[in-house]
Amino acid sequence: MRKDRKKIIMLLLLLALVLGSALSVYADENWSEDYYRAVDLTENLSEAQRNDLDSGCIEFMKTYHLDCCLLAVPTERYADSSMEELAGGMFTENGFGYGEGKDGFSIVYDAENGAEVILCMGKAQGVIDERYLDFIKKTVPKYQEEYGTYGPLYASLRMLSKEMEKLTEEGSYRIEDEGAKAAGESASEELVSEEDTSGEDISEEKAAGADAQKEDAKDQEAQKETLDADADLTRIDHQMAEQIREMAEQIENPTDADTGTDTGAEAAGEMPQIQPNLDAILTGQELYDYIEKVPKADLTRGQTDPQTRADETRTRVVDHADLLTDEEEKRLDARLYEIRKEIGTDLVVLTDTSCYGKDRSVYAADFYDYNGYGCGSRFEGACLLICMDPNDRGFWTCCTGSHTKNAYSYANANMMDDMLYQYAKQSRFQEGITDWAENFRRLIKNGHPFCYDWMKGKLPEDFTDPGAPRIVDDGHLLWPDEADRLRRTAKELSDIHGTDIVIHTCYNTAEMELADYEERFVRANGYGKGDSRSAILITVEKNPDYMAHVYVRCFGDAKAFDRGVGISRLQSRTETLISDNGAFEGLDACLGMTDSLIRKGRVPRSTLSWALSIALELVLGLILAGILLGRAKKRMDTPKVEENAEPYLVPGTLSVQNLKDSYISSSVSKTRKPSESSSSSRSSSSSRSSYSSSYSGSSGRSHSGSGRSF
Amino acid sequence: MSALLEHKCPACGGTMVFRPQDGLLQCEYCDTKMSVEDYAKTQAENTHQMEQEETAAQEAAAGQTDIQQDVQAPAPTDMQQGVQANTQTAPSPAPSEKPEQDDPNSQLSGFDFDSLTDQASDETAANLPVYYCVSCAAEVIAPAEQVALSCPYCGNNIVLTDKVSGPLRPDAIIPFSITSDQVAAAVKRYYKGKVLLPKGFFGASSIGNITGVYLPFWVFDGKVGGTVTYTGNKTSHYSEGNYNVTEVKHYYLSRKVSMQFQSIPIDASKKADDAIMDTVGPFDISKAKPFDMAYMAGFTADRFDVKKSAMKQKANTRIINSASRIAMARGTAGYSGVRHSKGNLNAELSARYMLFPLYLFELQHEGKKYPFAMNGQTGKVAGKLPIDKAVSRAYFWTRVGVTGGVLILFSVIKYLLGF
């Protein structure tokens, strides 16, 4: 009898194991990855942010067997319903939910009002205390100001994760397979029932006492949880802020760990194949010989060539045209590495003496693709090709990856090409390439090639930096020695007058209001002397096609100099001098005039200005004298014979009757209307880039790019 | 009856002169004052009494007193004979009794110019009548157009009645309101502010004799009427597709016009400068008095000597020109490019012969004479003033210098203050 009982138990256990594994296998198919878990109807999330949130939701689901979906909406989207209905609808209609019970959380965040709803579906109900859910809803909106829509969504997910982690550690929440659990439970029940029938008696009082003890323990635990929850909430708040900050940076600047992993849907939905690195970088004829060998089948499928993914040992600067010295190459490569780390975009530079029969755009794309450059699953990055073919000198920027291509718009391309073109014309390639790289860094990081880091983020309070350069030539209008000379002059004047004098050249203000731009520049860089942070900022905005615009603004005590026409005269004269004589001469004269303005309260006028002014005043005198002479002559009352008798017309006797108005004929003339001139004066410039929003290299991968001949 | 008329004081027999300041006649010797109307009444009574005495004397005595009048002209002209006949036989008819001249060409009613005006202007010095001053019996030869004058010997004021009688009698006269003493002040006011005059132009010694004279004027009234046709256009602009269209419609415009003009003065004296005469006006016609020679006492006077055709032409031209301008402006409003097509305006003119008071004087400067006239009724002065070129240049450049200098100084101060 005992032996038969043991056999039955073993069989049951075996059955439980089998069922459990089956269920666990089944459990992997209990969720669908067809839809993104993070949906943004406000269009504020970048693709990277959405992918990250989606990954986080899937990870959450895999970890806790509870689905999680995030939805950011504008208020108008649920005008006819409620956020709860929206949350429920999104969850069910998209087939979210883990397992048969469709368990999970549906979070809807109103980006306009900062309101959030967390809907618990299936077994997720009751898992997390309602008070904690309220805490999440109350806390997450404050991350919107700094991190945009991404902040509250990420915070919600992380706070849920942290709480689930805590509950799991404490044992309040168990992640168990349903089948194994069911089998285990039924097995234990059988065991219990078998044991019971073996003849042992359990008194009712003993069982009731045990139950009561269990109840007490649970109550105490619940009370303890309540007491700890409030303390935990504050701690979690600070942790979340830090983690969001870290996570936000990570999203924007993915590390190596993020490269080469398949964290999003590929174009074809498949992971790229990584092959070992080649020994040498392919360029020129070698490259195209290699491409010839690639099976056509790969190309027709539109796959990237599974050759290699460039690692950190592979240089990003290939200077076949010998435009850079070895030292410059190394420095540039190091800088490109830093930029890659910072923004997760692979910037590559190739100079060559020929494009080997290909268009510059294709050569740049092929070089980039077949040498395995690019960050992330989409090979984010850009390749700058400078071709020194004597018959076709020019440059081309080839962009790869959706993020990079989206950032490299036509307007941005033109601005960056404008700057590079100036350098290329002057054969200042090292500076030009470096400048291009920095512009690209800012483009990816801040959204605009000339949106400097100081234009973002909170401004520091009461920050002064005497060591900050007073001549900032972001517009690259000055040679280094010219900048030095201006720096010395500015410092001299600054020491004499106790007012910081700063010159800043730029291409444009990156679509920021001028006043904000100037304010930020001064405060972020710590300019200003004395308690009032007295400073005079001279901003020169100049792009290659247009004359300079000069803006002078006074801060602190220096505002006393801004009276009368001094500042406007300073601005207009400097603009004229820069246009006529060049940036250095103009700015040097501007410093002199600034000195005069501070000392004497006025800006000196040029001799020509005086001459014109005097001439104009004399002309006015001539005109006035002529008028007076005419009046004097009229007063001479020279007699004249009366020719008419109108003063003698008897009032009331005039009668003019219209007898007839007869139409005779008409004549019609037509002139063609003048055609509209081109919309923007900028578009009429001759030095505009060739831009392509989408083209393919030999690999078939999509690129965008722009370039010019020089 | 003598063709010379002297205005004698009824009290003492002295010479009466007309006083512009109060419009009275005053004896130069006994200061007797009376109005022109009273004087005329007195004179009429005296004349009647004298006639009665003469008749009585004639009846009592057997002889006649001859009027000593020796006309040296070889043959009196018809006009003179007519004048003399008129003056000898009967008082001049009242202006209302003048015969109307039916001349369809002239369309000018009022005065019979045909035989009078042209003949009067043909008189030469050899044909000038000689008068004998009643006071001193001196021979007085007067220019043909002169009506009133002073005896060059005894200074008596003489009116040549034959030249203002009958058909030559003016319809009205505007008496002097301004005395000769006021001329200097009026001239001073006149040249005040005229900075371009040569220096010393209006000095005290440069003004010659000031002569108060009644000058002849014809005062025309006119009725204008007629039907006139014009051509005119109406222009519209609009857009049609890719074109700007301009459409011009041409019209014939037919208008019936009528209007009246009144009291247009045109001077009838050859020696008077037309421009000065036109400028020195206007004269207030409403203050004109029925003609009486007494108003001329103490002043000289001229009668008309401009040909009828010239005056008529002048009046017609002024009236028709004005009427055409007014009719076109009023009748073609709303049309552009208006031109006269056909039809004319016709004027029916009537004229009155009047004497207007003026003070005439000349200024001499650097050998040149500059005629001036002052309106004896309003005091308005008119004359052709010279413009000194050197003064003009100095005036101009001074102002250039001052204006330019002020502006330059202003800009310097503005610069120094930092503005």
Image (cartoon, coloured by chain):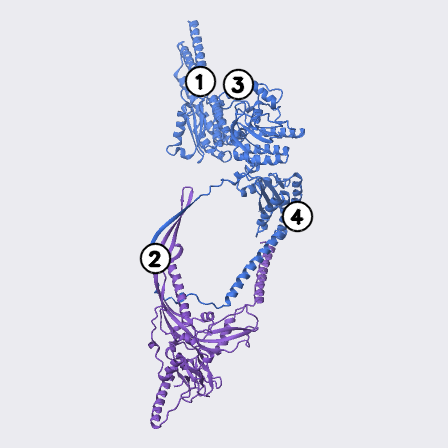
Chain colours: A blue, B purple
Could you tell me how far apart the alpha carbons at marks 1 and 3 are, in whole angstroms? Answer: 41 Å
Give the residue number, with chain letter if any, for mark 2. Answer: B254
Evaluate if marks 2 and 3 touch, with contact meaning CB atoms under 8 Å apart. no
- Is residue B216 placed above or below B132 in the rendered structure? above
**Which mark lies nearer to you, 2 or 3?**
2
What residue does disc 3 label?
A296
Q: Amino acid at mark 4?
A: Ile
**A201 and A62: which is toward the camera:** A62
For the C terminus of chain A, give its image quadrant: top right
- Would you call the spot at circle 1 few (<14 residues within 10 Å), some (14-19), or many (20 or more)? some
Image coordinates for residue A30, horizontal then vertical, percent:
43, 19
Q: CA distance from mark 2 to mark 1?
A: 105 Å
Return the residue at label 1: A27
Q: Residues within 10 Å of mark 3 (few under 14, many from 20)?
A: few
Q: Are marks 2 and 3 on the same chain?
A: no
The image shows residue A61, relative to residue A558, as above or below, that is: above
Residue B306: name its quadrant: bottom left
Q: Residue B376: which numbered mark, if any?
A: none
Which mark is first along the chain, 3 or 4? Answer: 3
**Can you see residue A150?**
yes
Residue depth check, mark 1 versus mark 4: number of the one nearer the observer: 4
Q: CA distance from mark 4 to mark 3?
A: 73 Å
Q: Which residue is mark 4?
A: A496
Cα separation between marks 2 and 3: 93 Å
Chain of the residue under the numbered disc 4 shown in the image: A
Q: Amino acid at mark 2?
A: Ser
The answer to which of marks 1 and 4 sits earlier in the sequence is: 1
